[in-house]
């Protein structure tokens, strides 16, 4: 009686890693089609169901785009934003060789609500600059940002043309305020109709919502900036470094 020989197929985790290496080391460019499922199975001796699961994982992580009836195609990588650093979006994209453009939607002097009064520790009569910008990555709207700054702390900030100079660079050059630390909360939200128009999406689509505060090295109590933003999840992925806490430290 002949015994069936058990094949040692590659695991999903191993296959995902192998596929990522393949994408990084190949000459494939954005929009190029990768080799077929059949070719991959024959090349690496993998199970078809495991392969499809691994490919779905790479689609979720932004490496590939699946087009029904055609196959899998190389996709531009999402922008990886590390929650532990304050590296600017412009610098991150420059490192990736990608293009960032900014359009100022509005730049107005407003008066703070209760929340901003509490954060900035100011009265309701204190002027605040509200800066609203749309950030384009590779010519596509990717991020809608709202920045709030105390104009008593940063006099004449409203006169700066933020379509030509980054916010943090202006704060450093004009006021010697350099970001030192910050706090932010990240959640999901649904687009309003006006926001959907800006992004070319549908009302109710899920987007990443962020809000927080940025502090400079001179002041640990009152932030130099309060911000909130909407980010297209097709463009961004957020990572965080985890530290093991020893027993008795938690």
Image (cartoon, helix red, strand yellow):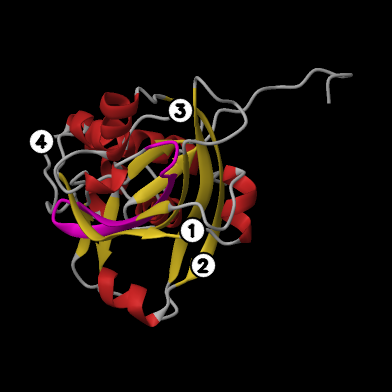
What numbered label is drawn on residue 189?
A: 2
Q: Could you tell me which residue is drawn at 36 percent across and 53 percent down? A: 55
According to the picture, the residue beneath numbered tag 1 turns out to be 209
Q: Quadrant of the C terminus?
A: top right
Distance from disc 4 to disc 1, alpha carbons, whole Å, reads: 36 Å
According to the picture, the residue beneath numbered tag 3 turns out to be 85
Mark before the other along the chain sequence, 4 or 1: 4
Give the image quarter of residue 136: bottom left
Distance from disc 3 to disc 2, alpha carbons, whole Å, reads: 24 Å
Q: Give the structural element (helix, strand or loop) at label 1.
A: strand
Is disc 4 surrounded by few (<14), some (14 to 19) or many (20+) residues within 10 Å? few
217 or 95, nearer to the observer: 217
Q: Is residue 170 visible to the viewer in this orientation of the structure?
A: yes
In the image, is 48 to the left or to the right of 30? right
What numbered label is drawn on residue 83?
A: none
Mark before the other along the chain sequence, 1 or 3: 3
Q: Is residue 21 visible to the viewer in this orientation of the structure?
A: no
222 or 156, nearer to the observer: 156
Q: Is residue 7 magenta?
A: no
Q: Are marks 3 and 2 in contact (CB under 8 Å)?
A: no
Kindly report which numbered mark, 2 or 4, lies closer to the viewer in this rendering. Answer: 2
Image x and y of residue 186, in percent: 55, 51
Kindly report which numbered mark, 4 or 3, lies closer to the viewer in this rendering. Answer: 3
Q: Give the structural element (helix, strand or loop) at label 3.
A: loop
Is disc 1 surrounded by few (<14), some (14 to 19) or many (20+) residues within 10 Å? some
Q: Could you tell me which residue is drawn at 45 percent across and 79 percent down? A: 204
């Amino acid at each position: 009686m002949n015994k069936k020989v058990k094949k040692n197929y590659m695991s999903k985790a191993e296959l995902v890693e192998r596929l990522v290496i393949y994408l990084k080391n190949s000459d494939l460019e954005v929009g190029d089609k990768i080799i077929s499922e059949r070719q991959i199975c024959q090349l690496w001796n993998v199970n078809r169901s495991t392969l499809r699961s691994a490919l779905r994982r790479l689609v979720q992580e932004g490496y590939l785009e699946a087009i029904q009836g055609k196959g899998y195609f190389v996709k531009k990588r999402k922008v990886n934003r590390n929650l532990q650093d304050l590296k600017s979006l412009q610098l991150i994209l420059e490192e990736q060789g990608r293009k960032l453009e900014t359009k100022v939607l509005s730049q107005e002097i407003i008066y703070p609500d209760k929340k901003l009064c509490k954060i900035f520790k100011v009265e309701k009569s204190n002027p605040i600059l509200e800066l609203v910008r749309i950030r384009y990555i590779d010519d596509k709207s990717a991020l809608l940002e709202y920045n709030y700054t105390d104009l008593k702390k940063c006099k004449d900030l409203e006169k700066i043309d933020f379509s030509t100079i980054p916010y943090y660079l202006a704060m450093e050059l004009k006021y010697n305020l350099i970001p030192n630390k910050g706090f932010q909360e990240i959640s999901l939200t649904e687009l309003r109709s006006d926001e959907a128009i800006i992004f070319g999406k549908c009302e109710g689509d899920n987007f990443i919502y962020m809000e927080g505060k940025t502090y400079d090295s001179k002041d640990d109590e009152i932030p130099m900036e309060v911000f909130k933003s909407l980010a297209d999840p097709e463009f961004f992925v957020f990572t965080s470094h985890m530290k093991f806490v020893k027993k008795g430290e938690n």
